[in-house]
Amino acid sequence: MIYEVTEGKESARVELREAGENLYDVTIDGQTVRVDVSKSGRTVYSIIEDGQQFEAMVEERGGPKFDVLVRGRLFHLEASDERSRMLSQSAATVATGPENVTADMPGKIVKVEVSVGDAVTVGQPVVIVEAMKMENPIGAPIDGVVTEIAVQEGATVESGAPLFTVTPPPKEG
């Protein structure tokens, strides 16, 4: 999966490719390293790169924002995949009907963050899907109300499977 990761005014293109069990090829701006990653706590990942072992603590801050503490340095990052970027670029287009969200890849539903009837804002995590040993928050594509949740915690989903629906609020006027 390809992400655009930013910290402040700097950004990088990051590609994650599964290379085996717990093994990933990580390409950052064209430079690739292979890492062995395993989750060792709720927010802690044990990483081995080029024979060096270290831990990274990852704390989600909502939507595509998260903090990463690694080797004594704290990074305030924002990551967006192609789908999220396309959605944000088309934000000028006002949704007029329900937005159905589907799984981008196979995975397991780790958590459902909201209930049917809850109001959500664009980017707010609605479900967390574990794919390739990583937890991926799937956010609301628009501001609105969750009108359907098609999954339950613990369920496995295939790529393209329906996850949830968000309906925009009625237009005032």
Image: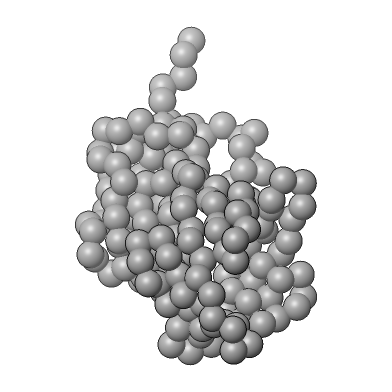
Residue 31 vs residue 161, the one in the foreground: 31
Does residue 172 lie above or below 153 as drawn?
Answer: above
Does residue 123 lie above or below 34 as drawn?
Answer: above
Residue 25: x percent and y percent?
60, 82
Residue 13 vs residue 164, the one in the foreground: 13
Residue 91: x percent and y percent?
61, 37
Q: Tell me, what colour scheme is on the image?
A: one colour
Q: Is residue 158 left or right of residue 1?
A: left
For the N terminus, the quadrant is bottom right
Report whether residue 51 is seen.
yes
Q: Is residue 93 left or right of residue 169?
A: right
Residue 145: x percent and y percent?
35, 33
Does residue 134 lie above or below 7 as drawn?
Answer: below
Q: Is residue 66 left or right of residue 3?
A: left
Residue at horizontal 41 percent and vertical 60 percent from the top = 43
Does residue 31 lie above or below 71 as drawn?
Answer: below
Q: How many marks?
A: 0
Residue at horizontal 61 percent and vertical 49 percent from the top = 76
Residue 54 vs residue 63, the one in the foreground: 54
To which quarter of the image does residue 169 belong?
top left
Residue at horizontal 67 percent and vertical 43 percent from the top = 89
Residue at horizontal 35 percent and vertical 62 percent from the top = 42
Residue found farthest to the top: 173
